[in-house]
Image (cartoon, grey):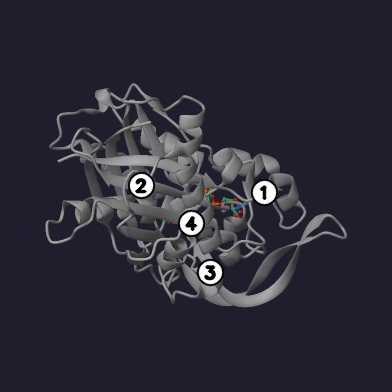
Amino acid sequence: MGIVLLGPGAHTPDKVITNLHLEQIVDTSDEWIKTMTGISQRRISLDKNPKDMGLLAAQNLLKTTELTQPIDEVIFATNRHSDEQEFPVHAGYVAAGLGIKKVIIHDKSAGCTGLVDAIQEAYNSINNPNRRVNQVLVIGSERLTDMTDYSDRNTCVLFGDGAGAYLVRRDETQEGIINSVLGGEPDTGDKKWLHGHLALEYKEGKKLVWSSSSEKFKTYRHTQNYLVMNGKEVYRFATRVMRDAVNDVLQGTNYSLGDVDRIIPHGANIRIIEAAEKGLKGFKGEIYTNLDRYGNTSTASVPIAAEEAIRLGIIKDGMLVINVAFGAGFTYGANLYRAIL
Ligand code: ACO
């Protein structure tokens, strides 16, 4: 049966925080950040929360993708609900913003794999004969800067904000989504990392604000849940599972790595992507990321990169594409699909 992936649409905030800005805030350098992560700048949303950004990404998607039939389901993937409010569901906010009155709505948490996971869930929903679902809107939206401690140089250089959205639609005439894989390796941490190697910890940290009087980013002390990370452990996991997920998603299909035109990886660190690429024997296509300009936007990083790749003609109609992601939990996943533009 044909189920296609359409879009994506994206929204990225206007405010840019560069490595040079971060040099003013923590003991770091532009050179260290670029060399160790590949990131030069990231966007920060000081005014819009994840549900607002998610709605904007969906509206941008609908400007370029014709809605030929109703949206039956909305899945909202995020790690950071607006103002830490997991209730009510953000998918309902987006649906209401689009004027949809009757629809299945739910949110999803699967670390940075959230949107890849939501695409698979949308596929299953359309495939389920007990559900009358023909079209699903999936959204990944993040304001990770809101849970970032700007006194912790190990993490604050990595993250940015943004949102992306796809439509998953039944279309018997097209090949569309060919396969998806999901996986996880529960991360329970160790003696030092009691809550996991990529987790939240309630502590005093520093929040970031923009001071329009001094035209500078400033920080203030604040106690809340902040993201903490054992970077080396995450790095080891990520390089292994990104390579494995790409190979796994091709298993049982009629395609091999040599047939794949583009890979859109979760943008966490260019070194993770390059290390994973080395293990992809036979891959002759291109891996596309724009994490140098957006940092790690978690569930939104794949659609933000894919939207740009389509706009620049890097992903063309009919190309064989893989979205691949990993995230806190630990989680990972990949979607293999034929691009339809
Ligand atoms: N600027 C300057 N120095 C720094 C900085 C910084 N921003 N951050 C760390 N350092 C220092 C450390 O303090 C350490 O100094 P020391 O040797 O004096 O103690 C040195 O640099 C090396 O630090 P490590 O953490 O050992 O460096 P590593 O090689 O592991 O690189 C990095 C760190 C880039 C974070 C890497 O571990 C990584 O990319 N990990 C994966 C991160 C990731 O992808 N996270 C997101 C997951 S997705 C999600 O779900 C949110």
Residue 93 higher or lower than 336, as above or below = below
Are dots 4 and 1 in contact, CB under 8 Å?
Answer: no
- Which one is earlier in the sequence, the residue at label 1 or at label 3? 1
Q: Please give left or right for residue 194 compared with residue 179 in the image.
A: right
For label 4, the SS is strand
Q: What residue does disc 1 label? A: 14
Residue type at numbered disc 2:
Leu
- Which one is earlier in the sequence, the residue at label 3 or at label 4? 3
Residue type at numbered disc 3:
Ser
Q: What residue does disc 4 label? A: 141
Q: Quadrant of residue 319?
A: top left
Tell me the distance, in whole angstroms, between the alpha carbons under discs 3 and 4. Answer: 10 Å
For label 3, the SS is helix
The spot of residue 72 in percent (x, y) is 30, 58
The spot of residue 18 in percent (x, y) is 70, 46
Please give the name of the residue rendered at 33% of the width and 54% of the height, measured from the top-left corner. 71
Ligand 1 within 8 Å, label 3 CB? no
For label 1, the SS is loop
Are dots 3 and 4 in contact, CB under 8 Å?
Answer: no
For label 2, the SS is strand
Q: What residue does disc 2 label? A: 167
Q: What residue does disc 3 label? A: 82
